[in-house]
Image: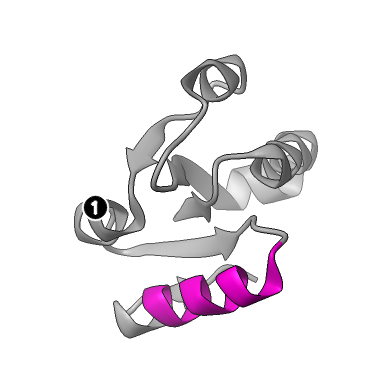
């Protein structure tokens, strides 16, 4: 299975994780490494059984050979993060 990073660690990430868990086809194809974000609600992530990977700069160095999905509602921030991950050599999960 392919490794997946969720970029973001808030409410939208919670929704993506819930969708991932409910979709058996998706969860078979992807191995969820965790969420990357400058900060995280560790209690929320613990409830979701999801690991905090640290800030994006740490995630791109420690989670090589992974794909990413951005779970951020702010469109300008989402665009900047896509650019950051693409520049670091990552491809979006589709």
Q: Residue at x 45, y 40 (%)?
A: 34
Q: Residues within 10 Å of mark 1 (few under 14, many from 20)?
A: few
Q: Position of residue 13 (x, y in %)?
A: 65, 44
Residue 1 appears in the picture as rendered: no
Please state which of residues 57 and 91 is positioned toward the viewer in this rendering: 57
Q: Position of residue 24 (x, y in %)?
A: 74, 40
Please state which of residues 14 and 91 is positioned toward the viewer in this rendering: 14
Location of the C terminus by quadrant is bottom right
The stretch drawn in magenta includes residue 84? yes
* In the depicted structure, whether residue 61 falls above or below residue 85: above
* In the depicted structure, whether residue 16 falls above or below residue 84: above
* In the depicted structure, whether residue 46 falls above or below residue 74: above
**Dot 1: what SS?**
helix
The stretch drawn in magenta includes residue 28? no
Specify whether 23 is left or right of 38.
right
Q: Position of residue 50 (x, y in %)?
A: 51, 29
Task: Report the magenta stretch's main SS.
Answer: helix
Specify whether 79 is left or right of 14.
left
Q: Residue at x 69, y 65 (%)?
A: 74
| Residue range of the region highlighted in magenta in the rendering | 74-85
């Amino acid at each position: 299975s392919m490794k997946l990073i969720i970029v973001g660690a808030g409410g939208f990430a919670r929704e993506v994780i819930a969708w991932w868990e409910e979709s058996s086809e998706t969860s078979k194809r992807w191995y969820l490494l965790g969420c990357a974000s400058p900060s995280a609600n560790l209690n929320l992530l613990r409830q979701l059984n999801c690991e905090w990977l640290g800030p994006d700069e740490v995630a791109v160095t420690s989670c090589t050979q992974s794909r990413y999905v951005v779970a951020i509602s702010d469109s300008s921030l989402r665009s900047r993060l896509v650019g950051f991950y693409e520049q670091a050599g990552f491809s979006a999960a589709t």
